[in-house]
Amino acid sequence: MRKPSRANLLIATEIAETNDAEETELATPWNILIVDDDDEVHQITRVVLADCSFKGRPLNFLSAYSAAEAEKLFAEYPDIAVVLLDVVMETESAGLQLVRKIREDFGNPKVRVILRTGQPGQAPERKVIIDYDINDYKAKTELTAQKLFTTMISALRSYQDIVTIETSRRDISALKMMEEELRSAKEEAEDTLSQLRAAQDSLIHAEKMAALGSLVAGIAHEINTPIGTALTSASYLAERTKEFSQQFQSSQLKRSDLTRYLSLAGETSRLMLTNIERAAELVQSFKQVAVDQTSSERRRFDLKTYLGEVLLSLRPRVRRTKVTVEVHCAENIEVDGYPGALSHVVTNFVLNSLLHAYAPDQPGRITITVTQPAENEIRLRYSDDGAGIPEEIIGHIFEPFFTTRRGAGGSGLGLHIVYNMVRRNLAGKLKVQSQVGKGTVFDLSFPQRLPTGGPQAGTASALPSPEG
C-alpha cells in the first residue's frame, strides 16, 4: 500500500486547521458596541436585535454611556464590528471626536460606524458625512425596528467583506499604496480638524451670547431621544403583533408563542409609555421657559415649579459635568412678576458657574435656596462650591465686557445684563460674596408682587451701568 507523501500530510493538516478555524469563527458572535448616554436606547436596541444573526453568528452587545467608556471597550475588544454611536454625550461633539480616535488613534478602518443622533441640527448630515469617516447616518426619530435591523445586517456584511479583503491581501506594493493613501487622508483630516476647531471657537462664543439658542439645542436632544425610543418600540411591537396575528389565523399558535408575545408586548408598552410621558413633561417645561424668555410677559407663576422648569432646560449642559444642582423652595409661593427675567438670571448663574467655577470633570454642588424673610419679599440665595472669585476682581464682575475667560468663550456681558435685569425687571437687589477655593454666593431679593405701574420688561443693554 502506498504511503501518503509529506506534502499530502501537510495539505491535510492545513485543511483540518482551516475547518477548525471556520467552526470557531461560526461560534464567535459579532461584537456590537452601543454608545449612548440614554439607558433606554441601549434597552430597545437589545430588544429589537435580540434574535438577529448574520452568517450563523449571533450578536454580542457591548454598552458604553460616554465616549470615554467607549475608548476603553475598543482597547479591550479590538474586533468590534459595528458601532451605534450617539453624538451629544459628555460634550456636544463627543461622538464625532470618538470617530476620529477610532480611525486615527486606534488605527481601525474596519469597524462600521453608524451615527444615531437625536439632535440632527447639532450634527448636520451633509457636513458630518464629508468631515468624518462614518458609514451611515440615522436620526433617532426615523430609525424604526425594521430599519435598525436592515442597517445592522448591511453593516455586518460590509465589515465581513472588509475583513476578507484585508486578510487576503499580501502584496507589498498594494500595502505601500494603502499606506500613502492613509497618510494623505490623515493630513486632510488634520487640516479639517484645524478648520473645525477655529469654527468651534466662533460657535462657542456665539452660544454664550444666545441663551435661547442653547435652550433650543437642549430641547432637540432631550425630546428626540424619548420620541425615537418610543417610535422604535411601537414599530417593533407592530411587527411582532402582525406575526402573532398570522400565527393565530393559521392555527399555528403555540402556548410558548403566546407567552413570548405577552412578555414582549408588556416590555415594549412600558418603554413607550415611559418615554411618551417623559417627552410630554419636557415639552411642557421647555415651552413655558422659551415663551417667557422671548416675550418678557408679566404673569403669575409658582416659584418652585418654575425654577424646576428652568433647571430642566439646563439639564443637557449640567449632565455633561459632575456638578449637581439642588433647589430648596417651599410649596405654593406665587410670584406676580416677570418670569423671563428670573429665568435669564438663574440660567446665567448656572452657566457662569459651569464655565468659571469648576475645572473639567471636577465634582461640585450648586444650591438654590428660596426664603421669605418678610411679607411680599422673596430672597433667592444662589451658591456654588467652586473656585471662587479673587478679591481684586470681585468688584468688577458686574461691569460690561469684564471677563477673565475672553479667549475661552466669555463675553463679559452676562453678569452685567443679570444685574440690570434684577434692578429693572425684578425691582430687586443683588449682592455677591466669594472666597477663593470655597465658592461664590449671589444674594437676590425682589418683591413677591410687583406694584402696578412698577418696573417693566426692557432691554438690559439700554440701562445705566451698575453701581460699584
Image (cartoon, rainbow, N blue to C red):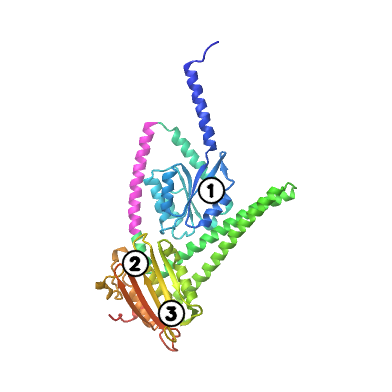
Give the residue at mark 1: 151
Q: Is mark 3 on a helix, strand or loop?
A: strand
User: Foreground: 109 or 19?
Assistant: 19
Q: Quadrant of the N terminus?
A: top right
Residue 273 location, quadrant: bottom right
Residue located 34% across and 57% down the image: 197
Q: Relative to 332, say whether 77 is above or below.
A: above
Outermost residue toward the bottom? 452
Query: How far apart are the two marked residues, 3 and 2, measured between alpha carbons?
Result: 23 Å
**Tag in front: 2 or 1:** 2
Q: Relative to 32, say whether 329 is above or below.
A: below
Q: Can the viewer see residue 423?
A: yes
Q: Is mark 2 on a helix, strand or loop?
A: loop
| Label annotation for residue 371 | 3
Residue located 28% across and 72% down the image: 402
| Label annotation for residue 225 | none
Find out whether the residues at labels 3 and 2 contact each other: C-beta distance under 8 Å: no
Query: How far apart are the two marked residues, 1 and 3, measured between alpha carbons?
Result: 55 Å
User: Foreground: 148 or 427?
Assistant: 427
Q: Which range of residues does the magenta coloring cover? A: 171-199
Give the residue at mark 2: 386
User: Foreground: 74 or 239?
Assistant: 74
- Whichever of callouts 1 and 3 sits on the residue coming sooner in the sequence is 1
Return the x and y of residue 187 as percentages of the image width and height.
33, 46
Callout 1 crowding tier (Cα within 10 Å): few <14, some 14–19, many ≥20: some
Outermost residue toward the left? 392
Q: In which quarter of the image is the C terminus?
A: bottom left
**Tag in front: 1 or 3:** 3
User: Foreground: 417 or 172?
Assistant: 417
